[in-house]
């Protein structure tokens, strides 16, 4: 909503006007000092995402207009219609979208939106647009310079010719020079007009780029998503305009030329000008860089390139007394950390300060773990135990459901609210808990203790027995495999960062190795000297850019990525 005169939403309902100090994105209202204290302590709102009001008001005005509720029905948006590209409340669905088939949960659509491919796509497109404008401006400026230089050369040639003739040609000379000046001036004016337009476009793009950073930091996921859709359309319009500029005469290379009249000797009776001044144009040598045609990829992270040589870790904190046989770990959006104690069939949750929050006993062994933001649950595999997948409700702090499966599941990862699991003796499977369906992704028979990870359109898994790490596409085709026992031996847990680089624990090599996104390079980033005696698992938090590495016994260490 627009906050031209911000007031505390709670106090306003009581006809009290008090300035807010905080904005709650989930309540969609400002809070004063007193209401903010109550809001942060209330059970229903203590975990809400809040932003200082001074920072929130820095968002662009059109972003502030985007709310979590439907303007027409004053109900919270819950569904996204892909056909009409709009969020809908339950009343909207009944009234306007009952015939639409392509509907999705809004929470699923906007989940991880700030790290999604679409968000990175827009950032890259803005950067690309700015660079292309700069390229055209530079080309036009160079053209101005060459026009001026060529003009000086022609003038010199005219003057040299004039020195060989008598005063009878003074008038003809003046006429020719005037023609030259007018021709060059006219073309230069056109180019300068275009340069002014391009400068304006460049300023608009720069403003969008600055706004993107503000949106990333302070906008809600819905605000981010809706603004992105508008930006995509604006960027497409600007791209088409630039393409049109390059193809039309407005950005063609302009060249002045001059040719002395061959019959200059007959100038007294026949020649009426020094020569003909022409403005020649040809396609300019500007090469604009455009990405491949944009595709609407909402929640698939975009894989950028980053050299692993620049990756270094900085100790953030140590979590002690995590368990006796830790095999899996993951980080939660609120900063808490979850570990699986394999021997004690227990899942333990620790607060962000390292203190223990609670634990849940599982009826089977607890091997690997993954967090599902769609329903705020943890999925736990059991390894070589009874074939069940345990679902833990984080809100109620207990097991919500035990799902029977056909194989011994070890490693587990989340993709589009579906679970990718390593099935011993089978391969990699995609399990949809909502309809109990299972799809075989990688049909290579895998041994026990294999972990999995997913990023973009790729799946990664370790093979403890062969000491290898393999990257496959969603059809199960192997794209690359890393095997180097001198660098990585008996790999276990693995995870990926925002660039598709793969972080892997080597149990026997007692280290952590990062493998480049193309599988061609590797770098050892952690060894036993960093405080690890028997490392088993790790988890990369793409939101905070932090790497959690857990020992089998006693402790885990959280690193920040430099």
Image (spheres, rainbow, N blue to C red):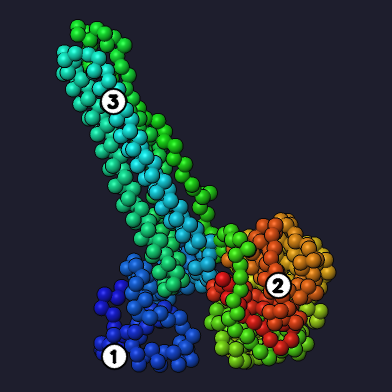
Rendering quarter of residue 304: bottom right
N-terminal-most mark, 1 or 3? 1
Most foreground residue, 109 or 352 = 352
Residue 9 makes an appearance in the image: no
Gap between marks 2 and 1, in whole Å?
A: 57 Å
Which callout, 2 or 1, points to the residue nearer the camera?
Answer: 2
Residue 560 makes an appearance in the image: yes
Q: Secondary structure at mark 2?
A: strand
Determine whether 253 is above or below 2 in the image. above
Q: Mark 1 — residue? A: 14
Residue in the picture at 19% in, 6% down: 269
Quarter of the picture holding the C terminus: bottom right
Rendering quarter of residue 328: bottom right
Determine whether 311 is above or below 377 in the image. above
Q: Secondary structure at mark 1?
A: loop
Q: Position of residue 69 (x, y in %)?
A: 39, 74
Left or right of 400? Residue 489 is right
Q: Mark 3 — residue? A: 156
Q: Mark 2 — residue? A: 512
Q: Secondary structure at mark 3?
A: helix
Cβ atoms at labels 2 and 1 below 8 Å apart: no
Gap between marks 3 and 2, in whole Å?
A: 71 Å
Residue in the picture at 31% in, 43% down: 194
Residue in the picture at 42% in, 33% down: 283
Rendering quarter of residue 222: bottom left
Q: Position of residue 279 (x, y in %)?
A: 32, 27
Quarter of the picture holding the N terminus: bottom left
Q: Position of residue 541 (x, y in %)?
A: 59, 74
Left or right of 274? Residue 47 is right
């Amino acid at each position: 909503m627009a906050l031209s005169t911000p007031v505390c939403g709670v106090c306003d309902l009581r006809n009290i006007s008090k300035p807010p100090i905080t904005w709650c994105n989930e309540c969609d209202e400002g809070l004063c000092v007193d209401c903010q204290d109550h809001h942060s302590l209330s059970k229903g709102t203590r975990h809400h995402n809040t932003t200082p009001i001074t920072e929130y008001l820095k968002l662009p005005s059109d972003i502030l207009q985007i709310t979590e509720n439907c303007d027409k029905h004053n109900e919270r948006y819950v569904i996204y219609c892909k056909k009409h590209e709009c969020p809908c409340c339950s009343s909207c669905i009944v009234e306007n979208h009952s015939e639409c088939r392509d509907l999705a949960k809004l929470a699923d659509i906007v989940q991880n939106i700030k790290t999604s491919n679409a968000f990175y796509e827009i950032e890259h497109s803005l950067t690309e647009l700015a660079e292309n404008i700069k390229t055209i401006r530079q080309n036009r400026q160079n053209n101005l310079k060459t026009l001026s230089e060529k003009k000086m050369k022609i003038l010199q040639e005219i003057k040299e010719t004039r020195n060989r003739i008598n005063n009878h040609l003074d008038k003809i000379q003046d006429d020719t020079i005037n023609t030259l000046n007018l021709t060059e001036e006219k073309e230069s004016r056109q180019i300068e007009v275009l340069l002014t337009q391009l400068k304006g476009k460049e300023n608009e793009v720069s403003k969008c780029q600055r706004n993107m950073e503000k949106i990333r930091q302070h906008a809600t996921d819905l605000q981010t998503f809706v603004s992105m859709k508008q930006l995509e359309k604006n960027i497409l319009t600007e791209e088409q305009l630039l393409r049109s500029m390059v193809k039309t005469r407005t950005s063609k290379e302009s060249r002045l030329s001059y040719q002395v009249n061959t019959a200059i000797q007959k100038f007294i009776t026949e020649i009426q000008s020094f020569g003909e001044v022409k403005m020649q144009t040809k396609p300019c040598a500007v090469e604009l860089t455009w990405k491949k045609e944009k595709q609407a990829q909402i929640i698939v992270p975009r894989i950028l390139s980053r050299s692993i040589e620049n990756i270094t870790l900085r100790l953030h904190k140590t979590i002690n007394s995590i368990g006796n046989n830790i095999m899996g770990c993951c980080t939660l959006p609120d900063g808490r950390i979850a570990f699986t104690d394999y021997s004690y069939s227990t899942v333990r949750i620790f607060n962000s300060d390292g203190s223990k929050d609670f634990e849940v006993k599982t009826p089977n062994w607890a091997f690997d773990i993954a967090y599902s933001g769609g329903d705020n649950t943890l999925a736990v595999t059991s390894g070589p135990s009874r074939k069940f997948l345990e679902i833990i409700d984080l809100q109620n702090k207990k097991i919500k459901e035990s799902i029977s499966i056909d194989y011994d599941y070890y490693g587990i990862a989340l993709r589009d609210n579906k679970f990718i699991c390593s099935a011993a003796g089978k391969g990699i499977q995609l399990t949809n808990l909502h309809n109990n369906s299972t799809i075989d992704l990688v049909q290579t028979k895998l041994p026990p203790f294999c972990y999995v990870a997913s990023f973009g359109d790729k799946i990664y898994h370790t093979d403890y027995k062969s000491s290898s790490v393999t990257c496959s596409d969603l059809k199960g085709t192997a794209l690359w495999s890393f095997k180097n026992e001198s660098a990585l031996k008996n790999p276990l847990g693995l995870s990926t960062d925002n660039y598709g680089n793969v972080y892997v624990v080597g149990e026997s090599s007692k280290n952590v190795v990062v493998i480049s996104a193309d599988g061609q390079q590797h770098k050892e980033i952690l060894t036993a000297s960093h405080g690890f005696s028997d490392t088993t698992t790790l988890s990369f938090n793409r939101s905070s850019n932090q790497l959690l590495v857990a020992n089998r016994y006693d402790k885990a260490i959280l690193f920040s990525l430099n």
